[in-house]
Amino acid sequence: MTAAWRVAVAEALKQHRRIFGTKLVVFSMLVWPVLTLATTYYTILPVTSAPGAAARWPLVSDPQRLAAFLAAGALAYTFFFSLVQSAWHFSFERVSGTLEALFLTPASRLALVVANGSGALVQNAWLFGAFAVAAAAASGTLHVAHPGMYLVALAALLVPAVAWGAFLNSLLMFSRDSAFLYTLLDDPLWFVAGVRLPLFALPLWVKAIGLAFPLTTSLAVLRGALLDAHGVRDLGGELALLAGLSVALFALTAVTLRVGERHAQRTGSLQLF
């Protein structure tokens, strides 16, 4: 446990010095999500006045609730996409030769990728997360069954996001074309996960694809727990699915790391995919 903690601290410190160490980056961590949220809100706003829109989606009749719905999506997307960015940066370490040096250390490979993702998550999402929570509390759009649901919502974001980040790190660590995955997990990710649109508005095949991504279910739990006053019993199915996805992602991460390292030992190359 002590060794894993040292790895986590070292990775967080490395990322802070390399990526997050300037005031401009800290400023952009709030401005970029807020601009994205504003763009989405004012893009959807004209559609809400269309005939029959309120009957199909009652939430559009209340601008504050609509903004809270979109803000929850922006918050969850910030959590998960920050890990896509982290994994993309992590893949550069193979090019620079840092990754080979890491593989020569006795550090746990799983602890390494989990620490890298966790460090990026905390440093990327904390500012917009604090802003979103403060704005929701000030506007009175939070509706929770009991205070414990705040912890449930936080866990439903953090645990799957860390598992997602670890899996992406293990993939891009051994992938030759990281730009392809980065592009694939940008706009397509928010579309299939229902970040800016309600899931019922999406075709069935898109919903099926979205279930493979933990962001979809995390967002359902976040909105249900904080905006619709759902309790643990109401969200039991979603929480069970999230737990299963998280376990599967951690297992796939461990397998990918083992196969990739054996491939590197046998061929001398870290390019597995």
Image (tube, helix red, strand yellow):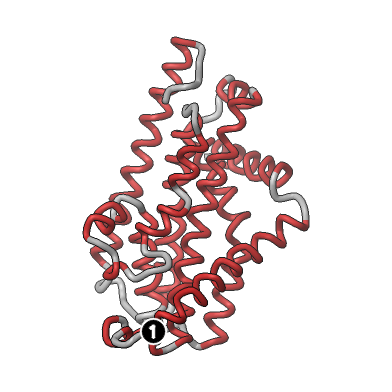
Query: Percent from the top left, x then y, of residue 120?
Result: 59, 49
Q: Nearer the viewer, residue 200 or 127?
A: 200
Quarter of the view holding residue 54: bottom left
Quarter of the view holding residue 34: bottom right
Identify which residue is drawn at 29% across, 86% down: 52
Q: How many badges with numbers are in the image?
A: 1
Query: Percent from the top left, x then y, of residue 24?
Result: 76, 57
Q: Quadrant of the C terminus?
A: top left
Identify which residue is drawn at 22% across, 60% down: 204
Side (left or right) of 109 relative to 23 = left
Q: Nearer the viewer, residue 172 or 207?
A: 207
Quarter of the view holding residue 167: top left
Which amino acid is tagged 1?
Answer: Val
Query: Percent from the top left, x then y, of residue 23?
Result: 77, 57
Q: Nearer the viewer, residue 5 or 178?
A: 178
Looking at the picture, does residue 242 appear above or below residue 112? Answer: below
Looking at the picture, does residue 61 appear above or below residue 173? Answer: below
Question: SS at mark 1?
Answer: helix
Side (left or right) of 245 relative to 121 = left
Q: Nearer the viewer, residue 190 or 133?
A: 190
Classify 10 Å Cα crowding around label 1: few (below 14), some (14-19), many (20 and above). many
Query: Percent from the top left, x then y, of residue 83?
Result: 52, 48
The residue singled out by tag 1 in the image is 60
Identify which residue is drawn at 28% across, 56% down: 206
